[in-house]
Amino acid sequence: MTNGSQYVIKFPCDFTLKVMGEALGDFETVTLAIVKKHFPQTDFAEIQKNSSKQGKYLALSITVKAESKTQLDALYQELSSTKEILMVL
C-alpha cells in the first residue's frame, strides 16, 4: 500500500449502495425509478429496507450489476441531486 491508495473496483461487479430518505412521500418510488433507469436488470425483490426507530426515515440497500465506473457515477449523480433523497452511500 502506498499513501493515498484507493480501493479499486473491478468491473463488472455486484455493487451495493445505500440510499436514505424520509419514509413518507415518494422517496422509495423515486429512488427505484432512478435505479431502474440506470440499471434496468436490477432485481428489486432483493432490496433490503430499514426504518429508523421512530419510522421517520427509510434506508434502502440496493445491489446492482455495475459494468463501469461511469455507470455508477451517473447513478450517484442523479440520486444525489434528487430532492426526495437525503443521502447516498
Image (cartoon, rainbow, N blue to C red):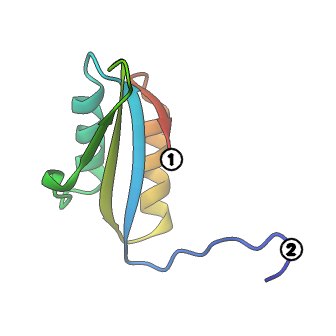
Q: Residues within 10 Å of mark 2 (few under 14, many from 20)?
A: few
Q: Is residue 83 above or below residue 77?
A: above
Residue 40 location, x and y as percent?
20, 56
At horizontal 43% and vertical 40% (from top left) the residue drawn is: 78
Residue 33 location, x and y as percent?
23, 39
Reading the chain from its start, which is encountered first: label 1 or label 2?
A: 2
SS at badge 2: loop
Residue 87 location, x and y as percent?
50, 34
Q: Is residue 57 above or below residue 8?
A: above
Q: Residues within 10 Å of mark 1 (few under 14, many from 20)?
A: few
Q: Is residue 40 above or below residue 78?
A: below
Residue 63 location, x and y as percent?
31, 59
Q: Is residue 53 above or below residue 3?
A: above
Which mark, residue 3? 2
Q: Disc 2 residue type?
A: Asn
Which mark, residue 6? none
> In the figure, residue 60 lies in which quadrant?
top left
Q: Is residue 69 left or right of residue 18?
A: right
Which residue is farthest left? Answer: 45
> In the figure, residue 1 lies in which quadrant?
bottom right
SS at badge 1: loop
**3D distance between C-alphas at marks 1 and 2:** 24 Å
Which residue is farthest bottom? Answer: 1
Q: Disc 1 residue type?
A: Leu
At horizontal 53% and vertical 74% (from top left) the residue drawn is: 9
**Is 77 or 1 nearer to us in this picture?**
1
At horizontal 19% and vertical 56% (from top left) the residue drawn is: 46
Report which residue position mark 1 lands on.
89
Which residue is farthest right? Answer: 3
Which residue is farthest front? Answer: 53
